[in-house]
Amino acid sequence: MTRDGPDLSLLAYDLKASGVVRNALRLAGAASAAGFRTELWVARNHGALRDEVPAGIEVRHSGRNGSVALPEGPDLAASLWALAFYLRERRPAIALSTGNHMSLAANLAYRLAGAPTGVSLWARASNATLATPMAAWLGRPLPRFMAGLINAANGLHYRGFERVIAVSRELGETLTGSLGVDDRRLTVIPNGVDVAAVQRLAAAPLDDPWFGPDEIPVIVSAGRLSRQKNFADLIRAVAKVRTRTPVRLVILGEGPAGERRALEATARALGLREHVRLAGFDANPYRYMARASLFAASSLWEGASNVVLEALAAGAPVAAYRCPTGIGEVLDPLGSEPSVEPHDIDGLAAVILARLARPRDGKRLKDYAGGFQLARTLESYVNCFTAALSPAPGG
């Protein structure tokens, strides 16, 4: 039987610069290269990565005909009907929600569409469960009964998925242990990094006076300016480090104007106005990482941190919060890249000082990052798609 719709549709909210979107685009390219008819559906057809959509991948977005954008605003709920229409009309063999922010919407849209025959709904769990960020915001563990209620509610939307793919072992254990995801429906595929591409881009010139050979050591961090990435703690830790040794901090990434203003105010209040720079989005952050004295990660939660892998691939030492999930899986085998629990600003300052005092050891970090090759990750996804779309024996 010949299908009219795509073999695979990747569902995302927008095309803004984030690890979730980058991974979705990589998956789309790999699936298309493997011969799967692949589409990308987004609620918002804009963002810094719009120009990085692989050639030949059709982008469909909100609107009854799949090509009319909705007005600006918090429109994910309004997009449910558009996504439901898309699933019902296009009937992709596999509809893969590419991040936690889309999973509930995808599940609801699938039900609104009447659970169309021939459509298999998958979720890529790319971030910590809901109780985790709530505890992170509070700075302490949730009461057990509250965490249980939140996890029970959070687990409901995973019940409609035929397959759930977790991006780290720790996240997979959380999904099965706390959210009730059946381990027979769970696959763990760790994130990967294109080491050769990172190192090629890292060698690009960087015209920045802060990174001169005789300049003050620079700590680099990168990510969306958001509560999750928690750059305010990193700025405070840098203030403590500067009581012992001169350092500067560059944060790469964009975010809401209010978040930027708050971070700038924190830096000013700590006397760091001339020593902290919010550099905005840069399409090639690796040239900063390669020249940094240290890469710091202060997230309160992750699924698995792509940017930490990328920093290692660029040869940058790492100091990090050991947030759930996945950071420990990456850093522990190295035995040299220190981490502390989230909100421990004194501890973060201490591990930054400890790592700055050690040799940079860039070659060893690059070699280690080679064990997380993106090609291997993408091959694992393609193998999952192939197995799911292959005719059953005797069928």
Image: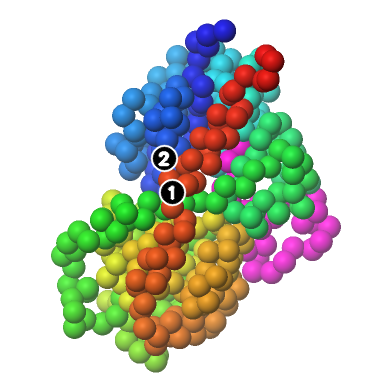
Q: Which residue is mark 2?
A: 26
* Residue shown at the point (80%, 50%) measured from the top left: 149
The N terminus - image quarter: top right
For the residues carrying marks 1 and 2, which lies nearer the camera in this image? 1
* Residue shown at the point (31%, 29%) measured from the top left: 55
Q: CA distance from mark 1 to mark 2?
A: 9 Å
Classify 183 as above or below 138.
Answer: above
* Residue shown at the point (67%, 20%) measured from the top left: 392
Specify few, some or many for label 1: CA neighbours under 10 Å numbering under 14, 14-19, or 20 or more: some
Q: Quadrant of residue 91?
A: top right
Which residue appears farthest toward the top when viewing the image?
1
Q: Which residues are magenta?
A: 123-151
Q: In x, y percent, where is residue 182?
A: 76, 41
Which residue appears farthest toward the bottom when viewing the image?
244
Residue 318 lies in the magenta-colored region = no
Q: Which residue is mark 1?
A: 374
Q: Quadrant of residue 32?
A: top left
User: Three-letter amino acid code at disc 2?
Assistant: Arg
User: Three-letter amino acid code at disc 1?
Assistant: Leu
| Total marks placed | 2
Q: Is residue 134 at least partly visible in the picture? A: no
The reply to whether dot 1 and dot 2 touch (C-beta < 8 Å) is: yes
Specify few, some or many for label 2: CA neighbours under 10 Å numbering under 14, 14-19, or 20 or more: some
State the SS at label 1: helix
Q: In x, y percent, where is residue 356?
A: 39, 83
Residue 134 lies in the magenta-colored region = yes
Q: Quadrant of residue 198?
A: bottom left
Q: In x, y percent, where is residue 265?
A: 39, 69
Q: In x, y percent, where is residue 199?
A: 29, 59
Sequence-first disc among 1 and 2: 2
